[in-house]
Amino acid sequence: MKKVSFIIPCYRSAITLPNVVEEIKTTMETMKDRYSYELILVNDCSPDETFEVIRGLVKEDERIIGINMAKNFGQHSALMAGFHYATGEYTVCLDDDGQTPADEVGKLLDKLEEGYDAVYARYAHKKHSPFRNMGSWMNEKMAQFLLGKPKELYVSSYFAVREFVRKEMLNYTNPYPYVIGLVLRSTKKIANVDVKHREREVGHSGYTFSKLLGLWLNGFTAFSVKPLRIATGVGGCCAAIGFIYGIYTVIKKFVNPDVPIGFSAIMVAIMFIGGIMMVMQGLIGEYIGRIYISMNSAPQFVVREVVRKEDLTKDVTKEDVR
């Protein structure tokens, strides 16, 4: 019997989380002859009562571990925190809002049993907002171009990996984790399975534009030097264009001395090349800044508290004695 570790990053999910946990329990009960399981619920410093809900779930089931982060580090850092506490041969990651169908986890596990190292859920029709779908599309294209993701492979927040992949991801200790990149650099034996994507029951996505931008920057700078090579190429092209335009200007002056050299054309060229240089310098600065932060050993995450059923039972016993 193999053990499955479910990891759920939690943020503003006090209402939806109990249903997700119950669905996992019900589904795994149908596969109890094949798998045992544990649930690791990581509260990413949610401003609502999410961690109190997690405490209540932990009290009811010894297979649940609750992790409370000291501040909001983001979904990928929350996943990395959960990886440290997982003990299963298989690890399944899914969302806390009920949109990822926990009752179809058997499809992911069956694909792992076929010999694949990682399996991603693929949705025929996503129920996210247009903004979130746009962000997912950008994430797909970025992973494809910068990280070498196969074009036919669909990546999502609902996925399963083998134990060696999870342990390999833990070797990454820098403060900017990007789980998709970590999986892609660990193995090429990755598959998709088709599942249904659900409508959001309550609330809205926790991914704002700034968080999506930060996620993209992690992918840009943490796992690829292609942006720097693109900067070099763009700089070379601009230099070549400027050189050619300079030759053209000299020839034009010799051919027709009466034609004035346009001030506006010069200003446009300066503004264009200057803007390109500032963008490229900013990109290089982003790399240098992240190197500096990594050298200062900035943490991926900080865990404030870990709760298990036995710990909460001990606390209750002490209160009864008093």
Image (cartoon, rainbow, N blue to C red):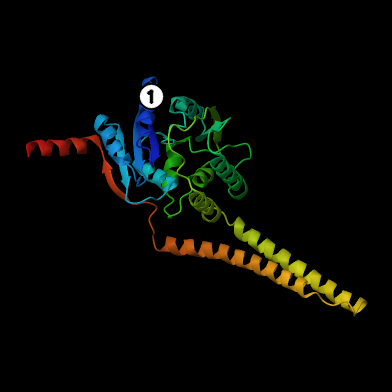
Which residue lies under the disc numbered 1?
A: 28
- Quadrant position of residue 7: top left
Residue 69 seen in the current view: yes
Q: Position of residue 95 (x, y in %)?
A: 43, 36
In the image, is residue 99 above or below residue 221?
above
**Which residue does the image show at 37% across and 42% down from the upper left?**
82
- Quadrant position of residue 260: bottom right
In the image, is residue 162 above or below residue 223?
above
Q: Is residue 244 left or right of residue 197?
A: right
Amino acid at dot 1: Met
Q: Position of residue 161 (x, y in %)?
A: 46, 36
Q: Position of residue 166 (x, y in %)?
A: 43, 41
Residue 2 seen in the current view: no
For the C terminus, the quadrant is top left
Viewer-proximal residue among 224 and 309? 309
Viewer-proximal residue among 5 and 94? 94
Q: Residue furthest right?
A: 255
For the N terminus, the quadrant is top left
Q: SS of the residue at dot 1? A: helix
Q: Position of residue 277 (x, y in %)?
A: 64, 68
Number of on-image labels: 1
Viewer-proximal residue among 114 and 28? 28
